Structures are given as structure tokens and as C-alpha cells.
Image: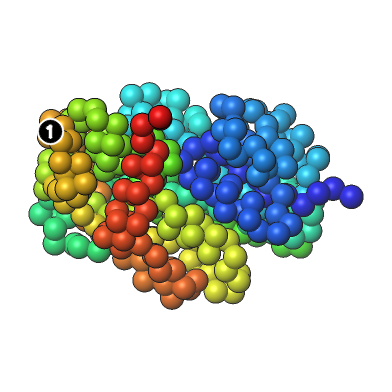
């Protein structure tokens, strides 16, 4: 008898670290982790198996289907916003073709196993594209269907993959006139900027928040690449993990849409600066605006309306801004960089 497992791609990333540790605490959950890079040693005991490999490798994915009954796929692997702008063709290949490979795997597994495989997909506020700061201010909290006009390759990739997920869930088997076969159960969360105390951010355009904090803790100069008045929504990693687990465990009948916003707090860059300087009075932080990255962040909403997630699967963040810094970020990051004696 084959083992039932949860598959996590991009397992060595920021979200992967928290998700693997959380899933490992569930009795009976076996995890197969997949990443291009070697898995962090702290995560190895949490996984039934780690595979160092590429989501573009169709033969590798075929072997996974042959070896395991995969009940849930958490597809975390992607090239993030800033890095994607430097190499958009590679980003498209990984973010879109890689996702299509995983969606195809999910469909084939669902048919083979006789039950729908849950496909949990983290998307991003990068799918939004507001035209100017005046519109951004006027709109306030953005609902899922509003302003889906991204201006980055990453945002275009994420929005397209959201629609691919909807297609394979709702329409693929119907068009094939084969309704007896199961398809995937695609569930997507659009994340705001994420801040983790455990991992250093890499390649996200919202990373000025966590970079400011980590830089101050390490005693390094940090040049913030956006204006002090820049405002977008953020969330700390424990709440991001909580939202993924909640949407995965929600009954199918309670899921009324494929894509959900989640949010927590919406500070300006200056608000984050003030908190960091209060915790680290000697922090060397300046504002040195990068015009291209500023343009990207200005196209993202000031806040997101996550009322649908609250209604459908009882989403509510545990951490507001004050608790995020006082109880999670500042204590953990100070401990992370404390001098070794």
C-alpha cells in the first residue's frame, strides 16, 4: 500500500520553513519536500522524504505519482517579483510552466486515486495594478476581482496561474465530457507582504519591511528602496501559515470562490522605520528610492478586503501590527542575531 503524503514544492523558502514545521505537528501527516536547493537541516526531521529537484522535470513528477498517494499539494516554488523583472522569460518558465506541471500532476493524481487532490496555491498582491497614487488612496481596501491589471511579470504569472487553477478545477473535465473523473480542488490565497523572523527575505519587492528589521538587528546599513509614505498590507509568517492550514482544512462546500485575499496590518514604510529605530536606536537606515521598485509598489493596494475568507473559512489574523513586532518579530530577531559567547 502506498503512503498518503502532502507534497510541498519550494520547501526551503520562507513559507516552506513555517509550513513544514506546522504540518509536522499534525499526527499522521507525512511530508514529501521538493526544492532545487538542499533542505535546511532543521527541516529534515520533519519530512518523510526530501527530493532535491526541479518542478520543470516531468519525469521526476511522474515518479512521485508512481510512488505516493498525494492528498494535498502546497505549490510554493516561484521566482519572486524583483528577480522576475531582471529575467522575465526565466520567471515565466518557472512560475507558469512549473505550475502547469504541478496542476497536471494534481489532475492525474485525482483521477488515479479516485478523489480530488487539494492544490493550495500562494498568490500575491502583485496581481493588482492600480494606475496611480490617487486611485490607490481612493480605492482603499481592494476586493479580489478589482484592478487585476498587474504591471510585473511576477504579477502576470500569478494571475494567469490563478486562472489555470480555476480552469482545471471547474472546466477541464466538463470540456472533455468526462464528468466521472475527479479533478483537483484548487484553493488560492493572495498574500500581502510577508515578514518572517526566521528567514532572510530574497527577491520580493515588499521586502523593504523585513530587510529594514534584519539589517538593524545585524548592525548593517540599510537603504530602503521606497518612499517613507509608501503603504501596502503586510502579515507575519505565523499568520500566513495559519491561513494556508485554514483554507486547506475548510470543507469543500464552504469554499465559494477559488481565490481569497488575506491581510493583517497596513503600515507605511515610515511606520516600520519608527518601530525599528525604537528597538534599535543606532540603526543606520536611509531612504534611497529605486524608481522601478517604487513604481511596482505604488501599483499595489494600500490594503486588501479579506471579508470573504472570514465568512467562508473563519479567517482572522492573530497578529496586528503591535503584536507582530512586540511578541514575534523583535524578540525572535534579537535572539537570531545575538552575539555568540
Residue 238 lies, in percent from the top left, at 44, 55
In the displayed structure, 127 sits above or below 56; it is below
How many numbered callouts?
1
The residue that appears at 39% across and 65% down in the rendered structure is: 318
In the displayed structure, 145 sits above or below 197; it is below
In the displayed structure, 313 sits above or below 32; it is below
The residue that appears at 52% across and 43% down in the rendered structure is: 17
Residue 327 lies, in percent from the top left, at 35, 57
Mark 1 highlights which residue?
286
Can residue 146 be seen from the camera position used here? no
Residue 52 lies, in percent from the top left, at 64, 28
Q: Secondary structure at mark 1?
A: strand
Q: Is residue 240 left or right of residue 29?
A: left
Q: Is residue 217 left or right of residue 340?
A: left
Q: Is residue 277 left or right of residue 77?
A: left
**Which of 6/158 is in front?**
6
In the displayed structure, 52 sits above or below 43; it is above
Q: Residue furthest front?
A: 341
Can residue 34 be seen from the camera position used here? yes
Amino acid at each position: 500500500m502506498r503512503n498518503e503524503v502532502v507534497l510541498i514544492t519550494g520547501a526551503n523558502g520562507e513559507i516552506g520553513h513555517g509550513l513544514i514545521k506546522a504540518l509536522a505537528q499534525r499526527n499522521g501527516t507525512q511530508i514529501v519536500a521538493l526544492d532545487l536547493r538542499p533542505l535546511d537541516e532543521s527541516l529534515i526531521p520533519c519530512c518523510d522524504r526530501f527530493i532535491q529537484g526541479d518542478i520543470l522535470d516531468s519525469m521526476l513528477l511522474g515518479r512521485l505519482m508512481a510512488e505516493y498517494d498525494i492528498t494535498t499539494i502546497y505549490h510554493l516554488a516561484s521566482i519572486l517579483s524583483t528577480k522576475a523583472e531582471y529575467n522575465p522569460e526565466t520567471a515565466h518558465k518557472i512560475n507558469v510552466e512549473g505550475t502547469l506541471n504541478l496542476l497536471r500532476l494534481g489532475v492525474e493524481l485525482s483521477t488515479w486515486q479516485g478523489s480530488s487532490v487539494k492544490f493550495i496555491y500562494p498568490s500575491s498582491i502583485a496581481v493588482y495594478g492600480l494606475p496611480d497614487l490617487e486611485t490607490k488612496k481612493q480605492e482603499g481596501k481592494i476586493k479580489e476581482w478589482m484592478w487585476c491589471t498587474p504591471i510585473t511579470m511576477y504579477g502576470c504569472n500569478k494571475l494567469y496561474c490563478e486562472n489555470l487553477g480555476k480552469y482545471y478545477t471547474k472546466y477541464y473535465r466538463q470540456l472533455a465530457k468526462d464528468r466521472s473523473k475527479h479533478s483537483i480542488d484548487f484553493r488560492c490565497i493572495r498574500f500581502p507582504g510577508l515578514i518572517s523572523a526566521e528567514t532572510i527575505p530574497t527577491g520580493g519587492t515588499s521586502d523593504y519591511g523585513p530587510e529594514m528589521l534584519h539589517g538593524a538587528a545585524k548592525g548593517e546599513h540599510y537603504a530602503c528602496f521606497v518612499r517613507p509614505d509608501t503603504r501596502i498590507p503586510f502579515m507575519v509568517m505565523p499568520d500566513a501559515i495559519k491561513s494556508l492550514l485554514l483554507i486547506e482544512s475548510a470543507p469543500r462546500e464552504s469554499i465559494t470562490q477559488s481565490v481569497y485575499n488575506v491581510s493583517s496590518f497596513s503600515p507605511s514604510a515610515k511606520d516600520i522605520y519608527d518601530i525599528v529605530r525604537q528597538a534599535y536606536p543606532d540603526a543606520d537606515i536611509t531612504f534611497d528610492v529605486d524608481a522601478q521598485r517604487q513604481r511596482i509598489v505604488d501599483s499595489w493596494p494600500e490594503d486588501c478586503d479579506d471579508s470573504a475568507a472570514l465568512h467562508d473559512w473563519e479567517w482572522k489574523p492573530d497578529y496586528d501590527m503591535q503584536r507582530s513586532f512586540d511578541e514575534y518579530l523583535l524578540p525572535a530577531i534579537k535572539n537570531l542575531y545575538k552575539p555568540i559567547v
